[in-house]
Image (cartoon, rainbow, N blue to C red):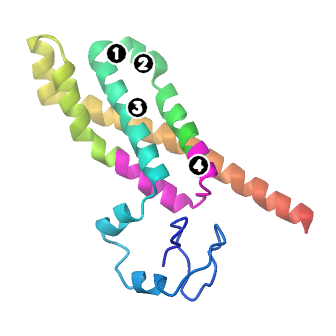
Amino acid sequence: MYCENCKSEIEEGTKFCTQCGTAIVLESKIESKIPKSTSFHLFKSMTKSELFVGGIILLSLIVQAIMVVRSSTILEQTQFVYPIVCAVIAIIIYIKNNIFELKRIIVRSLIAFFCSPVLLWILMVLFSCGEYEVAYYLFAGLIPTVKLIITNVLWFYLVILGWFFGYTIIKKFNKTNKG
């Protein structure tokens, strides 16, 4: 079952959401009978802020793909900046919207990374100059695309995991000091 306000998963029979405190109405029990594993349910339950984070990830990957084709030396110097900036923006959005479920954060942002390879490959072909580059990116362009995505995924999640575990440790430390 999911909270109608913050979309976080809640246990059956719960009267209030543990994340945002919203009262759970009886109509929510009907939604819990819908299978949770369907991709439709995953997209339906995404919030605007999660879609915005996915859009930022895609935009960052598009800029990097164009830079790979135009000038790979600039991208080599700044390749870690893009995923780190995306992760920091995502963290700010997650904090602002009280989204602190690691599984939810990982699954929802992975959607953007998995949707991007074909789009980036097409962009590399379109933005390549000269017949040699077009042929190269058409036939072998998937390799730099996959390398770009893997690098971004690793750096993005390194920052997200660092924030999440740091936040969790600080939260537990504060609880033990107060209690």
Helix, strand or loop at disc 1? Answer: helix
Graded by Cα atoms within 10 Å as few (under 14), some (14 to 19) or many (20 or more), the crowding at tag 4 reads some
Graded by Cα atoms within 10 Å as few (under 14), some (14 to 19) or many (20 or more), the crowding at tag 2 reads few
Return the disc, 2 or 3, that comes first in the chain's sequence.
3
Q: CA distance from mark 2 to mark 4?
A: 24 Å
Foreground mark, 3 or 1? 3
Name the residue furthest right.
178
Going 47% across and 40% down the picture, which residue do you hit?
154
Query: Disc 1 marks which residue?
Result: 72
Query: Disc 3 marks which residue?
Result: 60
Q: CA distance from mark 1 to mark 2?
A: 6 Å
The image quadrant that residue 179 belongs to is bottom right
Q: Are marks 3 and 1 in contact (CB under 8 Å)?
A: no
Query: Disc 4 marks which residue?
Result: 161
Q: Is residue 50 above or below residue 76?
A: below
**Mark 4 residue type:** Leu
Q: CA distance from mark 3 to mark 1?
A: 15 Å
Query: Residue 13 vs residue 128: left or right?
Result: right
Query: Disc 2 marks which residue?
Result: 76
Going 70% across and 52% down the picture, which residue do you hit?
167
